[in-house]
Structures are given as C-alpha cells and as structure tokens.
Amino acid sequence: MKSITEARNPRSKGLDLMDTEAILELINSEDYEIAQAVGREIPNITSAVDAITERLKLGGRLFYVGAGTSGRLGILDASELKPTFGVGHEIVEAFIAGGPKAMTQAVEAAEDNTTAGGEILLGRDLSSKDAVFGITASGGTPYVLGALQTARQIGAAALGLTCNADSVLRKYADVVIEVVVGPEVLTGSTRMKAGTAQKMVLNMISTTVMIKLGKVYENLMVDMEATNAKLRVRANNMIQTITGVSREEALDLLERAGFDLKTAIVMGKLDVDADVARQRLLKADGYVRKAVSEPDPHTY
C-alpha cells in the first residue's frame, strides 16, 4: 500500500500556477490539521512517555534514532535538554543516519542501511534499562527499523513515531505513535507537515518526561543551567517568583547555593542553609515540591 506521506495532495496540484499569497495560504490551511492529528495520538504518546520515564528512573537512557528530517529533529530535541533541564547526552542522545555530516548535508543513501542504527546503539552498550525511540515519517526507514530490532533483542523499550497508519513500524516497536497528517503540499516533502507533527510530539514527550522526573516546579524549569547572561537573569527571576525575595537576595541565594537553582529555591522557601537544602532535595529525589513541603527542615 502506498504511504500517505508519498501521496499527492489534490488541493495542491496547481501549486506551480499559484501566486505567492495563494501558496502561503494553502500551506497554512494544511498546517491547521496537524495539532488535531497529534491530539488523536495522545493515548499512545502517554504510553511512550511512561515507558521512557520508567527507564530513566531506573538509571537507563533514551536514544532517538532517525534519518533525514526525522533524525535532525531528534538531535534538535536532545540538544535542547541540557540547557533546559540539565540533562546531557549521557542520558538522552540522538543518532542520524549518515552521522553528524547528515545534520547539514543530505546523506540520503544512509537511511537504507539496516544494520547501522543497531550497531551504533550496541556501541553505546545498549541495555534493557534503556529506551530507543525511532522517528520515521514513512514508518519504514531501514536504519530506524534496524535500531528498533536491536532494542527488542536487548530488551530495551522499543518506541516509534510515524506519519503513516498501519506502517511496518508496528512490527518493530512496542508503542507506535501514528500522527497521520495526510499528503504534503509538496508531494513527499516530509519536512513540512510530517516534520511539524514530529517536532510537536518530541516537544510533548521530552517536556513531559522531564516534568515526571522532577525537572520542573510549578511551570518553571528549575533544573535549568544558567550558562549565559539571559539564563542567569531567568534563574534570578525564578527564585524571586517562587520565594518572594528581592533581586539582590535572589542573587545571594544563588551564589550561596553554588549556582544550583533547586538548592537556592529550597534555601529561600524554607530559610535554611545550602547543606540542609541539598539534604532535603536528596531525600526528595530531586523533586522541589516534595523538598519544600515535608515538615521540620532541621531534622535533616
């Protein structure tokens, strides 16, 4: 059966005859359907989030695997986790068919290599505690399928994201997210609607996993690394917002906490020193809400 990601869109058959505004309006109207398609897959996205969270809590890792646009989106998502949540590639890592060169240059034939994805995972000592998340618009990319096959053989969680229904991906993944957005405006150009859908799902998954791991307090990224001026201002603002202290007091808390944002927050909320704050966070497994809500901070 021909995949819908390769089908022609009847609404765009006269694409080359349209004026600029008409092309843009057509693309925009097609994009309207993406969020609804993602919404229909929330039950499967939930299953993927829970599986990943379970593995990471056990000390496992998450590996994104993709080719072309799908691979680039996986790398983009993984690379954003360090500054946002303090989670680096030792916990979440992404691989693209063709290697780093494929991030900026097309290496199209690389996606046809069935063994390469699995080999790179084995090179990372893949274990049953890990999760492998395959990203493939078509649902049949050999590089991704091979990686998922390896994941299953090892006993790791095998998860997948595609933009086709009933794809071969179902034979290789335990949880399959099928965000069917229909034919692209430009036939087969899955960097468009399919790419947008994949980016939305990856945002949802990684953000929700990090929330479940205690990287967020209220709606604030409290495991953020303040590595530049903008982020230091953001960290200071968060401390002020959560604790009610002044800007100067927030900076003092941050400095006394060794620029660890969670520690500074607990210090400010409970009026304790850095050592007590760290002990509370340790006992609370890093969850700020739990650390600041338990009774008698001086018993630690």
Image (cartoon, grey):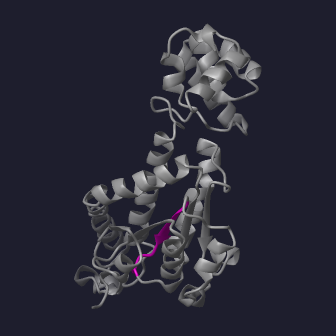
The residue depicted at 66 percent of the width and 22 percent of the height is: 279
Pick the front one: 47 or 263: 47
Pick the front one: 265 or 170: 170
Q: Is residue 138 above or below residue 247?
A: below
> Dividing the image into 4 quarters, which one contains the N terminus?
bottom left
Tell whether position 234 is magenta: no
Res. 291 visible in picture: yes
> Dividing the image into 4 quarters, which one contains the C terminus?
top right
User: Hey, which quadrant is residue 11 in on the image?
Assistant: bottom left
Res. 245 visible in picture: no
Residue 142 relative to residue 22: left or right: right
Q: Which residues are magenta?
A: 130-139
Residue 45 relative to residue 111: left or right: left
The residue depicted at 55 percent of the width and 60 percent of the height is: 130
Where residue 245 appears, as percent x and y from the top left, is: 60, 11
Q: Is residue 183 above or below residue 233?
A: below
Tell whether position 136 is magenta: yes
User: Hey, which quadrant is residue 178 in on the image?
Assistant: bottom left
Q: Is residue 168 above or below residue 283?
A: below
